[in-house]
Image (spheres, grey):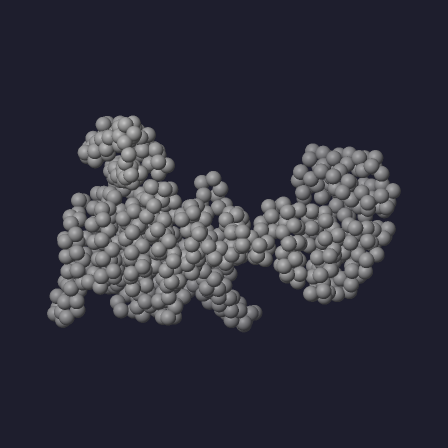
Amino acid sequence: MIQDTIDNAIKLIFSYHLGKALQILRPLFEEHRKLRDTGEMEDIELTFRTMLSYMRQNADDPDRQQLYVSLLKRTYCVAADLDIAWRCRNVGFYVTQFQKAAHLNMSRDFLRTVLETFVSDVAMLSLDTTDEHDNRERELYSRHQTFMERLFASIVVSCQWKDGDRKFWEQLLVSPTIDSSDALVIVSAITLSAMNQFDMNKLRVLAGVYLSATDTALKERALIGFVFSVDVDASFVYAEEVSLVEQVTSTANAARELLELQKQIVYCINAGRDTQKINEEIMPDLTRNAPFRVNINGMIEEKDYDRMQEILHPDADDKAMDAIEQSVQKIADMQRQGADIYFGGFSQMKRFPFFSEASNWFVPFRLEHPALADVRRKLGKSSFLQVMLTRSSFCESDKYSFVLAVSTIIDRMPPNMREMMTSAEAAGIEIPKEEATQPAFIRRMYLQDLYRFFNLHPQRADVVNPFAMAKDNKNVMGDRSFFFMNGLFSENEIDRYRPDLAVFLHDQKRYDDLLLLLQIFSEKQRRTLTYLLLRGRCMLRNAQYAEAVEYFDKALQKDSNNEMALRSLARSAMLSNKFDIADKAYANLLQLHSGNKAFLVGRSIALFNQEKDKEASELVYEADYRYPNDAEVRRIKAWMYLYQLKPAEALKEYEALTSGSPIPDDYLNMGYALWASGNLGGAGKAFSKFVKLKPGQDIFNEFDSDQRLLAKYNISEDDMYLMEELVDNENEEDGE
């Protein structure tokens, strides 16, 4: 396939194999002459052959290396342009954009004139007080929208930019003479183009806009576009890419912004998980207590008034309202923590014709957008639209979704519902003005726009998804989304923020990503308490318990009272059967939290396993006194009775446990109590129940691990084998 051939050629170019790259590109030009002009290709081949000829003649050429790199760059541009030409004929998204572009005049003077004239026309329109104002406004914005759609598409399918293109766009985008919304859409188009085919000059434009723009929204879009467009493979040929990354990351506050950006990308990637939490844990309560419903005709109506319900439960309405407020508060808390709370709902609202146009996924919300003409007619100048425009917590894409959705159903709403839906409160959680203008908020909203496009657009499979997971490990973020792992972003200012990001990944339970990040910590960072704790946590999660013990032990050498280290050491030591270490850890934890139930139970188990039955029993009695009838305490108390040769007392506890909310081990240990009491049949049934609750568990292995207890009751190895036979027979009979 041509696409694969071009991709292989680019890989060869970036690995300094020009001859091989030319060798596989030549047949493409010969077979598909309509795709690109062959002149540049022929000139590169001639220059390359001449260079090799001089080498054979042992000619001294101090500029040979520089010439070779320039040939690599020229060949890359040829291959990249060929790739775009192929996509515009054969790849759905690119075909659509190429057709939309319709050979727009891309001369710089023309583009500047159109963009600047629009600003002056809008200014003049504001002075128009005639009856024709509205018609002229619609015509102006409709004409400009068509132009911007074509310009967006033209940039997306554009070939490699020249230095002149770079200078033009870098200057124009930060100029106050063009509309700010236009500049934002153009930056998104450049991002989409550069992400899908590396272009050094487009990358320079994004960096230049970030470094020089005064408009916060423009600055943040450019930063995100820059990060997503950086290509570590290309840097082997384009050394200037390394310098550009260094320039961007070394500016004031850039490293901190990049840390925030990396965290916000993680929140976007977690959108699916957050949506599931909202749907399963919050929405059922919200729906159940809502005062309205949707009838079989799709009409929204109030629920029927129930007089009897009011008599029997006069406080029901207040309780329902409290439940709604609590549900809303939970969602608000998730949003404050950074979660993308709206993705699940709005993912079902991207089927409007509005979203068939790619540029509309990135255009800032404006009431004058031609697609909102019907909305403005129905909603007028409501506070709903004004808040949506200035301080809504929706990203731009969701604002359009919501407004378009409201306009389709508002005619079917009862008056009180219509009033509520057009109020300011309906426009999402209202954001204070000072927060809505902060870089972090603006960046988060744009990331959500991008996330929706790359995960919901009908032709999303045709473009690179910067939020995609790694191909070889679906639990790890991909190269673009986890840019902190990108070699170009190492050995510079953001290095010092690795520990901060590592803690964040741990809190987000992204352990596979965390482990990768820890592997690139510097030697100095690896000696810190943070590193030791987090590395230990990764080992614990990966069931490498012995290694986890070592890391937590080293952490405690730096801070002997660190509670996380003590808790984790106790747990990993128990799981690795290092009960003496667990005993000491729990003892230290009890000094910090005297009488803590979990620590009392944990230490007593560690002591029992060291055959320190007396000390263990004292802790069990203390736990039982402090927490009477607690299930965890009951379990360890019953175990203590077994060790004290009191199977009858143990059996009472296990009968109580199994009549409540038992765990599988309750049946195993109940079997021991019955066995010790001489009730072999009852023991067999209890063990059988245990095996059913833990499929694949070898009952004899359980007997073997508890041999010290069974020996107290003179239960021999032969007895254990016979009991295994009985359990197997019980299971066979149950299966018949």
Q: Is residue 126 left or right of residue 261?
A: left
- Residue at 18%, 58% in the rendered image: 115
Whether 127 is drawn above or below 340: the answer is: below
Res. 407 in view: no
Q: How many marks?
A: 0
Res. 695 in view: yes
State the image coordinates of residue 90 (x, y, percent, origin top left): 27, 36
Of the pair 227 and 663, the residue shown nearer to us? 227
State the image coordinates of residue 271 (x, y, percent, origin top left): 45, 53
Image quadrant for the N terminus?
Answer: top left
Q: Is residue 719 left or right of residue 411?
A: right
Name the quadrant containing residue 124. bottom left
Q: Is residue 41 left or right of residue 414?
A: left
- Residue at 45%, 43% in the rendered image: 470
Whether 17 is drawn above or below 585: the answer is: above
Image quadrant for the C terminus?
Answer: top right
Q: Is residue 540 left or right of residue 420?
A: right
Whether 199 is drawn above or below 2: the answer is: below
State the image coordinates of residue 445 (x, y, percent, origin top left): 37, 59
- Residue at 56%, 69% in the rendered image: 312
Of the pair 139 and 145, the residue shown nearer to us? 145
- Residue at 28%, 36% in the rendered image: 61
State the image coordinates of residue 110 (x, y, percent, origin top left): 14, 53
